Image (cartoon, rainbow, N blue to C red):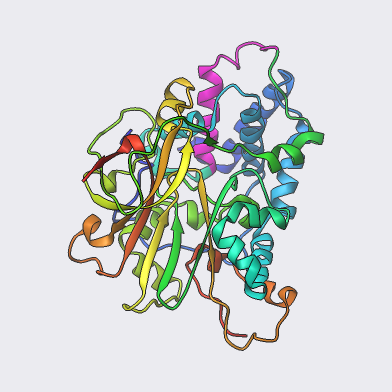
Amino acid sequence: MNGAHDLGGMHGFGPVAPEADEPVFHTPWERRAFALTLAMGFTGQWNLDQSRHARETMAPAAYLATSYYEHWLFGLEALLAARGLLEGASSGLRRLDADNVAQALSTGGPTARETASTPAFAPGDNVRARTIHPTGHTRLPRYCRGRVGRVERLRGAHVFPDSHAATGDPEPCHLYSVRFAARELWGPSAPTSDTVMIDLWEPYLERA
Amino acid sequence: MHDHEPDALERRVQELESLLVKRGYVDPAALDRLIETYEHEIGPHNGAQVVARAWTDPDYKARLLADGSAAIAELGFTGRQGEHMVVVENTAQVHNLVVCTLCSCYPWPVLGLPPVWYKAPPYRARAVIEPRIVLAEFGTDVGMDVELRVWDSTAEIRYLVLPERPAGTEHWDAAALAGLVTRDAMIGVARIAAP
């Protein structure tokens, strides 16, 4: 969806503002919102792409006016409500216990998958990021749509976020690192030397 | 906007946690453990060990650039938000910079959780369209004869920048070198100054 989260290339936000000796969390609620999000993710009631999509559904003005962990909190509350988990106790949810935290974190959630299909593109191929505007979750940034780049590397087949968020179907697709000249993306004011590398799944691309 | 005041947020999260604990969905001790892990155990000191090892062990550096996940796992750093690691090397010809314009993807096992500026709109908006101006704000000047290569972390590949080893450290061992490596250099917004 063309939400406020798709920030690449926007103007007007002012300078980047690093904080000296920044703490990992700034308030107690940030700690708990972070941990609740990870722990509830472990219950298997939604996947990572669905949790990203939940944050993206925040109204654009609210998204831009709130902090990162407020986005997380909004997304968590939205998913809990959508799954009906706030009204009554659901049995059979997988629960993350303290003793399992280290193991769960060190295992993570790899997204690489086997697939029988052959990659449509090879390194060196010119590809165009499709001009499409999916209304659900997508990881195709607006700023590269319609632009031509070159396949730099194949990254293997990975869970496809669009279908994974929409239906839970991982629908593995080939993933490519695509190199775009900064000039192709931004026009003649960009230095000729500069490039942007974007990881794009095969359904986002067409031959150019 | 009273919902966004700190007290309102503290109450909102406390109430949510109480409810989720009551329902049996979460273990409060697991929440404590998650927080401790990222506040005290996982952080940029992990990535600094990877970089220092690469600077002092050419075979390790070759493995790191060929298969980041496997080489980083050799040092014990694996898992969540670092399942598929790619390491990109800064040289005299190429300066790499990492961003996630769509959310705030970041290599947790080697850098910990991202700083606020990495997650906030100015960096996510500007790193792809005017990276040299962003770098200048960090005090980092990249010559026009150098390719500035920005990596937008749109998939589950997580990027770690291997910074250039500073001059004057030829006789330093890996432990001493690790002390020089900064988070910002491993994101690509800074270089590592000569000691």
> Is B59 placed left or right of B5 in the picture?
right
Residue drawn at (60%, 45%), measured in percent from left and top? Answer: B83
Where does residue B101 sit, x and y in percent of width and height?
Answer: 40, 49
The residue drawn where x is 67% and y is 75% is B56
Q: Nearer the viewer, residue A132 or A56?
A: A132
Quarter of the rendering occupied by the N terminus of chain A: top left
Camera-side residue: B34 or B191? Answer: B191
Would residue B119 be counted in the magenta stretch? no
Q: Residue A109: in sight, yes or no?
A: yes
The residue located at (53%, 75%) in the rendering is B164
Q: Residue furthest left?
A: A188
Provide residue B182's location: percent of width, then percent of height.
60, 69
Query: In which image quadrant can residue B58 be found?
Result: bottom right
Question: For this view, does B132 lie left or right of residue A73?
Answer: left
Q: Name the spot of residue B154 as percent of width and height, x first.
A: 42, 45
A75 drawn magenta: yes
Task: Please state which of residues B11 and A40 is positioned toward the viewer in this rendering.
Answer: A40
Residue at coordinates 60% horizontally, 31% vertically from top-left? B12
Tally of marks: 0
User: What percent of the width, then of the height, locates residue A14?
Assistant: 35, 60
Query: To which quarter of the image does residue A104 belong?
Result: top right
Q: Nearer the viewer, residue B55 or A143?
A: B55
Judge left or right: residue B127 versus residue A55: left
Q: Which residues are magenta?
A: A69-91
Residue B99 location, quadrant: bottom left
Our reading of the magenta stretch's main secondary structure is helix
